[in-house]
Amino acid sequence: DDDKKEKEKVEISKITGKPKRKYKTRHKMEIDENEEDDFSNFGYSLSDANLNLNHQVYPSSKFRGIAKSGRRWRARTCINGKTQYGVKSFFNPWLAAMEYDRLIRANRKDELSGAIKTNSQIILNFPYGLSQTDIRNHKLFEKELQKLDHD
């Protein structure tokens, strides 16, 4: 019966004729602040052929590749005309910016390593990575924000 109720609630778009689906946030996302994060380990050498290493790190309200969804932030990137979203959403925009960098590093490996030359520059939020202490602090901050959201 619950499945039937969920199916009945889905609205059909008048333009596309497909069901409208809203992104549902996962409020109880487990974040382990003590887990080692491989964010600063690129796995391959970066080339400045396509990567703009000289830009300044943005303040948290000006990160590249993140979009606000309600009170949370999600990573978002467009590659070959297709928009990809990060798996998780965060209250802390720093973690969403890290997720964006992970998406770019995973999907544009050839361009970042210099194997392929592009006309445009790739800009990462954290081209030199972050220290484990900074990552841990942002994860702790995210946990506190999640607790405040549940209260």
Image (cartoon, rainbow, N blue to C red):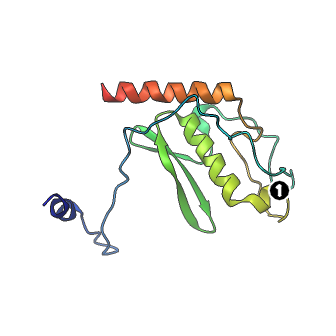
x%, y% of residue 75?
55, 48
The image quarter in which residue 78 lies: bottom right
Identify whether 108 is placed above or below 147.
Answer: below
* Image quadrant in which the C terminus is located: top left
Residue on which disc 1 sits: 113
Residue 84 lies, in percent from the top left, at 54, 59
Crowding around mark 1 (Cα neighbors within 10 Å: few <14, some 14 to 19, many 20+) is some
Residue lying farthest front?
A: 35
Query: In the figure, is residue 7 to the left or right of 53?
Result: left
| Residue at the image position 81 percent from the left and 52 percent from the top | 44
Q: What element carries label 1?
A: helix
Q: In this view, does 103 lie to the left or right of 130?
A: left
Residue 46, placed above or below residue 140 = below
Residue closest to the far bottom? 17
Q: Is residue 81 left or right of residue 53?
A: left
Q: Which residue is drawn at 49% across and 30% down?
A: 142
Horizontal and vertical percent position of residue 70? 38, 42
What amino acid is at disc 1? Ser
Quarter of the image with the N terminus is bottom left
Residue at 37%, 24% (x, y): give it. 148
| Relative depth, front residue between 6 and 126 | 6
